[in-house]
Amino acid sequence: MKNKILASLEKSNDFVSGEELSKSLGVSRTAVWKNIKALREEGYIIESVTNRGYRLTGKPSLLDAERIRASLDTNLVGTDIVVLRTVDSTNEEVKRRARQGSKSGLIVAAEEQTMGKGRIGREWSSSAGGLYFTIMLRPELPPENISSITLAAGYGVCLAVREYTGLDAKIKWPNDIIIGNKKLCGILTEMAAQADMIDYVAVGIGINVNIEAFPENIREKATSLYLETGRKLDRNDFFISVLRHLDIAAAAFLAGFTDAENQEFRSLCATIGRRVQTTKGNITIEGEAVDVCENGELLVRDDTGELHKVNSGEVLVQGIY
């Protein structure tokens, strides 16, 4: 319905009355108004005048695949770039395309996800103004060697945010980027593999860029680049910067991180040095996160001094969220 109303406004150079929209689409005037409101929340500028109706006077800045492609000088990511208006989930779309034979380096981005996914089956809020995309890679590696690719992606995004905005972005192990104690970005990695070789890996990334407000249930836990800087960013330029950093991070992952890169990652990891709680099997472990191992595992020293390697599961970090 929302898209049909938008199409009607785009076709007209003048005002379109609410009554006319109501009759042509077979809905109530209230439904028209609610959809106009939703379009405004997405960034469309719609003028309304009593007894005249609605007129579209401005559109949001949308991602431009051609502009992004023309500005990229990457080697591993961005072999093909697809930008969709709406999709169930960029991860699901990438998996569909991967099964159809798409080449490594494919990027699928979307302005809207109707079924955005987070870790452990959670829903990812995909508000207008965010940056939602998935990168598909086909590394020639056995499945057990892929565990730290999420950390590499987080490392790349963190560096891009710091360089582009000057904000003190940090990594919350294993898959979030935070500013202060609030979440800016989430990463979801999914994989398809044979017994001894990866078929493809889909790295889904959601970054809160120009979002002005969040739903009440996550308002105290989430932030955006707009809320932190007070200015709207050009999402195409920012996306290009993120992809360049992700390309470098992907190359580092495949080659093996250098000592300098490992040291920089640790310096950016907000989890290290904090008290954490996690569950391993049926055992709850509490203690201090002391390091991230070379294979991506979190090293936790419990209250008895015993060290535990954590490679999956939910990790609660004191002072974050």
Image (cartoon, grey):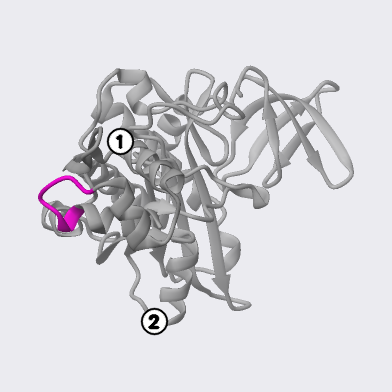
Query: What type is the residue that disc 2 sits on?
Result: Gly
Residue 224, position as x, y percentages in the image: 40, 28
> Would residue 69 be found to the left or right of residue 153 on screen?
left
Q: Quadrant of the C terminus?
A: top right
Report the magenta residues as a range: 10-16
Helix, strand or loop at mark 2:
loop
Residue 196, position as x, y percentages in the image: 59, 76
Q: Is residue 144 above or below residue 132?
A: below
Q: Is residue 1 above or below residue 224?
A: below
Q: Check if residue 38 falls in the magenta segment.
A: no
Look at mark 1 in the image and give the residue it sits on. Answer: 160
Circle 1 crowding by C-alpha within 10 Å: few under 14, some 14–19, many from 20:
many
Q: Residue furthest front?
A: 51
Q: Is residue 173 above or below residue 312?
A: above
Question: Residue 117: in sight, yes or no?
Answer: yes
- Residue at image point 67% right, 20% down: 318
Q: Please state which of residues 137 and 110 is positioned toward the viewer in this rendering.
A: 110
Query: What type is the residue that disc 1 sits on?
Result: Ala
- Residue at image point 44% right, 31% down: 263
Q: Please state which of residues 218 and 82 is positioned toward the viewer in this rendering.
A: 218
- Residue at image point 40% right, 46% down: 35
Q: Which mark is residue 110?
A: none
